[in-house]
Image: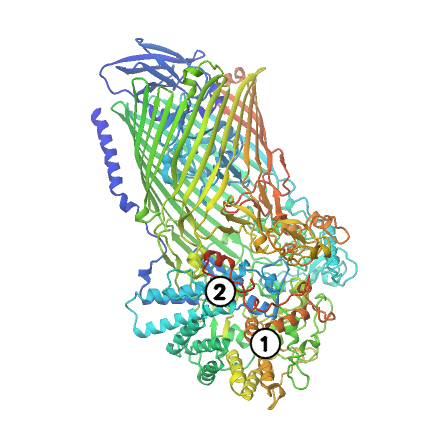
Amino acid sequence: MKRKSRLLATPARYFSLSAILLLFVFCASAQKQVSGTVKENNNPVVGATVEVKGTNLATITGPQGTFAINLPSGRTQLVISYVGFETQTINVGDKTTVDVVMVPVNTTLNEVVVTGYTAQAKKDITGSVSVVNTKNLKSVPAASAESQLQGRAAGVTVITSNRPGDGASVRIRGFASFGGNEPLIIIDGVPGSLNGLNPNDIETMQVLKDAAAASIYGARASSGVIVVTTKKGRGNAKVSYNMYYGRSVPGDGFTNLLNPQEMMDLAYLAKKNDNAVLKHDQYAPNGGTFRLPDYILAGTASGLMEGDPLVNPAKYNLDIDNVSGSYLIVRANKAGTNWYDQITENAPMMNQNISVSGSADRSRYLFTFDYLEQKGIVIYNFFRRYTARLNTEFNIKKNIRIGENVQLSYAKSNGAGLNDEGTEIANTYRQQPIIPVFNIKGDYAGSRGANLGNGSNPYATRVRSKDNRNHGYTIFGNAYLEVDFLKHFTVRTSFGGTFNNNNYYNYTFQTYENSENNSGSQYFEGANYFRSWTWTNQLTYKNIFRDKHEVTALVGTEAVSDWGRFLEGTRLGLFVDAVDFRSLTSGTRANGSPYTPASLFSQFGKVDYVYNSKYLASVTVRRDGSSRFGPENRYGIFPSGSIGWRMSREDFMSSISWITDLKLRGSYGQMGNQRIDPANAFSQFRGGIGSSNYDINGSQSSTVTGFQLSFVGNPEGKWETNTTTNIGFDATLFRGKTELVFDWYSKKTTDLLFQLQQVATAGAGPGVNPAFSNVASMENHGIDVLITQRGTLKGIKFDLTGTFTTYKNEITKLSEGVDFFDTDAGEGGRIGGVFVRNAVGHPISSYFGYKVIGLFQSAADVSSSPTQTAAAPGRFKYLDANGDNKITDADRVFFGSPNPDFTYGFNMNLEYKNFDLTAFFYGAAGKDAINYVKWWTDFVPSFQGGKSRAALYDSWTSTKTSGTIPIQEENGNFSTNGTPNSYYLENASYFRMKNLSIGYSLPSSLIKRAHIDMFRIYVQATNLFTVTKYTGLDPEIIGGDRAFGIDAGVYPTVRQFFVGVNVNF
Amino acid sequence: MKKITFKFVALLIAGTVITLSCGKGFLEQTPKGALDENTLANKKGVEALLIGAYSVLDGFIDGGGIFLGGWTSAGSNWVYGGVSGGDAHKGTDGGDQPDINPIERFEHTPTNGYFNDKWSVVYEGVARSNSVLKVMAKATDISAADVTRITAEARFLRGHYHFEAKKMFNKVPYVDETVIDFKVPNDADIWPKIEADLKFAYDNLPETMNAKGRVNKWAAGALLAKAYLYQKKFTEAKTIFDLIYTTGKNAQGQKFALLPKYHQPFDAATENSTESVFAVQYSVNDGAPDAANGGWGEVLNFPYNSGPGGCCGFYQPSQDLVNAFQVNAVTGLPDPDNYNATEVKNDQGIASTDLFTPSTATLDPRLDWTVGRRGIPYLDHGVHPGADWIRLQSYGGPYSPVKNVFTKVEKDALNDKSFWTSGVTATNYTLIRFADVILMLAECEVEVGSLDKARQYVNEIRARASNPAGFVASASGPFAPYAANYKIGLYPVASPAFLTQAAARKSVHFERRIELGMEGHRFFDLVRWGEAKATLDAYFLYVSGTSNPAINNKRLYLATPTVAKFTVGKNEYFPIPQRQIDLATGTLKQNPGY
């Protein structure tokens, strides 16, 4: 057979149903044997599935493409299927030999898709399922399939993180709840995580979006389900090797920052604006003319010039035991330190993947080994992972199969900050440019000294944290047994799960160079251990009556159990900072705890019915019992139903030749959510050294154990219910050249589990850490569209796919009398409030505050405007939303939302002769972000860090009233930087070229002699360009669901360049 | 063949049945690492809950999934009592902790997060006190005497936390152990209930307790009398204060007395002494995360840069407070009416490297144990270098706080080493010290007793402060062996300052300001005296440089765009936190004016 075509054909069309249906006949009565060969282009097709239609009887073709199968009486049809080829139904009639010629697929109608506990041909699916093209998926280099999923599946919104090893925020059709909106990931039938999975091992990936598709997962399905199967061995033994190597280019960082000279000009401007004394500890310590100092620090003095006796290097003294008494001397970097350049570098990324797979008579095997190394653009930040997978399956009897899938992985990393004011990246704008990296003696320089702000040297932070590590070990997989019996039945049991063990340690150095220093060294080490198992038993019945009524029925039970513990310790004031000495040997603090275990026990059933390949119906029901709820509400039932109509099979449409297939679908059903603290039902008392212990004896250095009510349980808690309506159609046009999938949905969450904050008079337990109660509700609706166009034009084979995703989220209820809650994304203590208000009638994570309508232009303008605290010329003028002629809390309005109007992906695959080209674009439109970096850089009084060019050149002054940003003053207030307002709002819509790769496959004539089946080399670039109006580092800003899109200097998405090789033997 | 098949099928069905049948127990999971109420319903458990109730006194909770409060809710009330009272400015940098800016200017609104924190912390204290009583009701192994003692301690704490709520917010709910619906309205005056709790404690607690940090009879009495004082029930207050003055003892059984030197109550080495009536016990390096049991509420209130603590330059004393320490060069007595007529010389606008000579004016020696200023030894950390230790002098002024700062001798032993700053100390915050009791007694004497007795009490306070052994020392300088021109005199018999009730009142009030400066009482005193409007408006005019543009040290932001002012009928109390009003769905009413 033609190996090249098989590998280049979309692996997405591999299907693993054959794993379940590899059957041998055991019933000997009243049957005849049929034999034959399966070929394609005169090449034998090895490993194709030959199945007696309407039964579970099947076999696979042997090395020469031959097969033999017993046909029971009354059965006349064989179904022959193989990945990448059209599934064919052959009417055997009286014949005893059949030769089948396979044709490569043009449509995906017969593609078999693994969904919940079962598999269906795509044409028979009535629920809303996005089938992900896994070849396209894997074309973007990433550690996790979560990131790769961006733009690949309609209905899925993905916000990626560019930090090595990170996953992404994956949300299916908006938000079902205020937390726990991560989809359920099922890998080979076992709940798992895409983050730990080697993406190269993925064979198929389906996204189950509506209740009809997902409610078979019941209580865990309300945020959607992603079903993944890993690769299986198939056909002759083969070895494939894939590798790529590339580099990430960090880019320029914050390019709008002032240089030291301009920083001085800005300080001068603020003093002039304030009519303050023109005196500055760095630029003019004795008043008079401002000038850049030669030294920013010498002992306790600042703003010194060369020749000053205070800067005599002989006076230099760094005593780590007496930091405040040390005499440090720091020369000014008048040219300016580019802190972003200091902490970033071109970062290599490499992946090596080898796999060995094949099948023999009664066994199939696949072994892969994968090594991924990604360095961060931030120095010393890296992620390294080794994974090995072994998937095998044995036919121990004709009708009995046993198999296993297992992945072992080990990951090692050094982290870096992602998105908050304390990260190394944030300190590239918080640290003034006049500060050098090192002082005159090569020790670190920092913000210590007058008027140098409170940032910390980010380079020092990175170097000091270079030996911090996280180590993670994971075993994930399952073993299963399947038995076929009584012609129509298959029983399957699967036991699987995960073992995680993580170890992590970090060391905090005592510092001396900053204005705010760590007062001592600290070593922290911890480990956690977690295991989860899932035991699934299911019975499947499959039959076809009178050739027209196809019935598939399924019943099953499932038990899930989670358990884990963790242990952490801290040691203070280590004798020396030496790496090898870091241990907890004489730790002063330890804590650890078992996690409260959680368990789930479920029964489920599903019936699919197809009449004459025309009318489709499906009913699913699942009953779940969860330990997370009290006994009264422990069980929940989640039903769904769906119908489909393949209109194109009707006579009246047979004349429309360009419509190959058209199916209308509709579904309605319910799913649940149980993602709450497993101990939610219980009131708990806890003791804690920091929370309830007290030094009642006045010892000054020890405490007596105390206890407090830390949590008031809610025994009444029950499932959150998510009711989904879905209407859609699947169209295949022009003999498969065009495919269109359209869905409209509405998703309503009721009894939403909300941490209903209690009045503080109930105590801090319920006041700060309230139990989940079923009080809120939320709605999402939108459309998902997928369009594919394939064809050949002047010898160029093309395959174009576009996805389009929308969701409109609205909070419809919180609780009686409470219609909003605010969420702090880290800015709360800085800006006199928070940006995000989650309120009834608005989408989750909406931005709320005063709306800036301009700047006050004059005293007259101030007096003629509504009364506003701290109003003055050049300061923000806020909207008097309620028209009462004064600006109060009541004038705050909703002014933006990070939820996009729509997101879209466009993928293009071109093949010409031996060349191939892939381009992928992704965009998000109509979304806002809060550029919180501006708070730091656009206002002089927002701490004395780096400032923006806008602050100096575009600010209002009494002589430049055209200024667009507020007057620069030394003190902040409500009308400048003292409250959340719409000044920080920016349009964060963007369009990005995510991927471009060009490959060349060596001609087979050339490589056959070396017994190589395929040899492809390629070059690739990611994130080549981004079109956006957003002024921060990256418009893609990851954050928690209750408050996202708030940018404190996010770890940015950057360009990457790669070369790679794919080889098959 | 078939046999084997059916064996497998039978096995699977059996497996399913087993799974089904064990389903019920399988789904029973209990919380780990936590206890339920029944496990704590015994002496050991109830005593531990009582400790938990004490542990909120510092205003900070860290752990168990809960973080609450901190500098926003410090037991010392430095923001509400100190900054609002004109003792000090927020200090530091305009952008840091911006929520304090409107509080300093009396422009605060109900949504200010500081108020919600303070409210939440005091009611957590109430909830924990109630928890003790609730769980104790189920215990059977506690002796009657212990039940009484534990009840009295818990009710004292409940009274204290409610007292805090009352003086901050006035109209507040009262929550006891019987409350089930916590949306308690704030429509009643809770003084009677606070009194009842404190009186029970006063009537039932023993004099001597088994730990220094516990409340005893006299501490309870002092707080009860203070509650009377806040209600102007001077007679009732005086009765108890008199008794405390004559026979009161601390929890260790030592008779109350002023320590010989003024600064000793603020030194960790001499805390829990005869002058400590009731104190928040701080401990450090005790294994708590984030130094949670130290003086966390005051962690920001240290000099900046190379100064002790290193962070963050908050709570900078005002020029008005400093001026109040000026005394008549002859009599050594203050001038409450005209103390701002001259500005105590300061180094505002002068770099640390430039020369500066401190004031040579005659000053009350308590100044330099209350305010850190350029040129004067700052505890044992050396001479205060001025600007170098100040975060942003142009914003916060030239001064540093002193009373909460650790000494160099204590460094590393009595300040925490685990934190981003070394400014978490073991130096207790004394909620009620004996000097406070004496001055409250003097107030009672002015109102219902003898003016001369009031004078004698004030003199007792001044006499201790005048002990030269307690002056800030300096080996060099024009006033060696002292750091400045210290003088403090006693009020003579028939002093005009005590001749009329009004004069005596003024003298006692002024003495209270000086003696208890920077200890978090000032704003609450001004409000209960009815002097807030006059005092604070004058304060704003002065420190902003509006009434006297010639002063060197002025806070321009208090005059921009208009001079800050106190609004009568509104600013006496802080607003009920809007979040609590929202959550209470109609049961909480906002204070007038907000």
Which of pointers 1 and 2 lies earlier in the amino acid sequence?
2
Residue pushed farthest top? Answer: A94
The chain ID associated with circle 1 is B
Which residue occupies the foreground of this view, B441 or A328? Answer: B441
Which residue occupies the foreground of this view, B23 or A813? Answer: A813
Which residue occupies the foreground of this view, A805 or A426? Answer: A805
Which marked residue is nearer to the observer: mark 1 or mark 2? 1
Give neighbour class at mark 2: few <14, some 14-19, many 20+ (Cα, 10 Å).
many
Q: Distance between the residues labelled 1 and 2?
A: 24 Å
Q: Name the residue under label 1.
A: B513
Residue type marked 2: Gly
The chain ID associated with circle 2 is B
Residue B424 locus on image (x, y percent):
53, 64
Q: In this view, does B243 lie above or below A683?
A: below
Q: Mark 2 points at which residue?
A: B59
Quadrant placement of the N terminus of chain A: top left
Residue B101 locus on image (x, y percent):
61, 61
Q: Do the residues labelled 1 and 2 touch (CB within 8 Å)?
A: no
Residue type marked 1: Arg
Residue pushed farthest right? Answer: A289
Residue A233 in view here? no
Residue pushed farthest bottom? Answer: B493
Q: Is residue A717 above or below residue A802?
A: below
